[in-house]
């Protein structure tokens, strides 16, 4: 696997990034785990997700966050999974119909980061 320095972050990431958007609605947890395990075995250390990923219907707020939950359950299995992975997540998408549960207000950024950390069962987000 080829790796590249990510800007001035000091992080080295695989040139291939694993997108996780369909983990949950189209790919069940067991298959998602197998995909992430295989990616890590192949040297892919850069995974991309978002707070709103994991929905079948974008207007249904109850499913949002499923992808981060699946990633978190995978991290919770141990084996150095979290330490070997560079995780990128995003937060712009609305998590509910309430006016401050989306976009880039300082309030939403704080809340979204805390919620993503909880769903992914980790104490840090890399990007």
Image (tube, grey):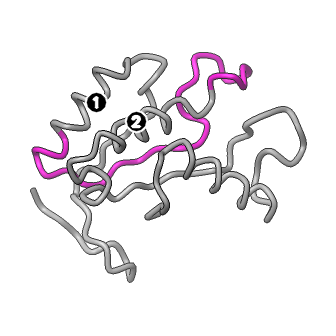
Does label 2 or label 1 sit earlier along the sequence?
Answer: 1
Residue in the image at 22% along x and 58% along y: 15
Percent x, y for residue 25? 48, 18
Which residue is label 2 attached to? 73
Of the pair 124 and 87, the residue shown nearer to us = 124
Q: In this view, does 48 lie above or below 22?
A: below
Secondary structure category for the residue under label 2: helix
Asked if the residue under mark 1 is in contact with the one under mark 2, i.e. CB atoms within 8 Å, the reply is yes
Q: Does the magenta stretch include residue 48?
A: yes
Residue in the image at 48% along x and 63% along y: 124
Secondary structure category for the residue under label 1: helix
Q: Is residue 25 above or below residue 127?
A: above
Which residue is label 1 attached to? 33
For marks 2 and 1, give the CA distance.
9 Å
Residue in the image at 12% along x and 61% along y: 2
Residue in the image at 51% along x and 52% along y: 89
Of the pair 10 and 111, the residue shown nearer to us = 111
91 left or right of 81 in image: right
Q: Number of labelled discs?
A: 2
What residue occupies the far right of the structure in this picture?
99
Q: Does the magenta stretch include residue 111?
A: no
The 10 Å Cα crowd at callout 2, few under 14, some 14 to 19, many 20 or more, is some
Q: Quadrant of the N terminus?
A: bottom left
The 10 Å Cα crowd at callout 1, few under 14, some 14 to 19, many 20 or more, is some
Kindly report which numbered mark, 2 or 1, lies closer to the viewer in this rendering: 2
Residue range highlighted in magenta? 39-63
Prevailing secondary structure class for the magenta stretch in the rendered image? loop
27 left or right of 102 in image: left
Percent x, y for residue 40? 18, 46
Labelled disc at residue 13 = none
């Amino acid at each position: 696997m080829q790796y590249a320095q990510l800007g001035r972050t000091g992080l080295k990431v695989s040139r291939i990034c694993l997108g996780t958007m369909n983990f949950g609605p189209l790919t069940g947890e067991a298959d998602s785990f197998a995909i992430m395990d295989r990616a890590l075995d192949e040297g892919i250390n850069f995974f991309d997700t978002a707070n709103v990923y994991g929905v079948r219907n974008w207007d249904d707020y109850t499913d949002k966050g499923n992808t981060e939950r699946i990633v978190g359950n995978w991290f919770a299995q141990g084996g150095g999974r979290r330490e070997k992975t560079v995780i990128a997540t995003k937060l712009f998408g609305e998590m509910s119909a309430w006016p401050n549960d989306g976009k880039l207000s300082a309030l939403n950024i704080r809340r979204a980061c805390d919620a993503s950390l909880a769903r992914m069962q980790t104490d840090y987000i890399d990007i």
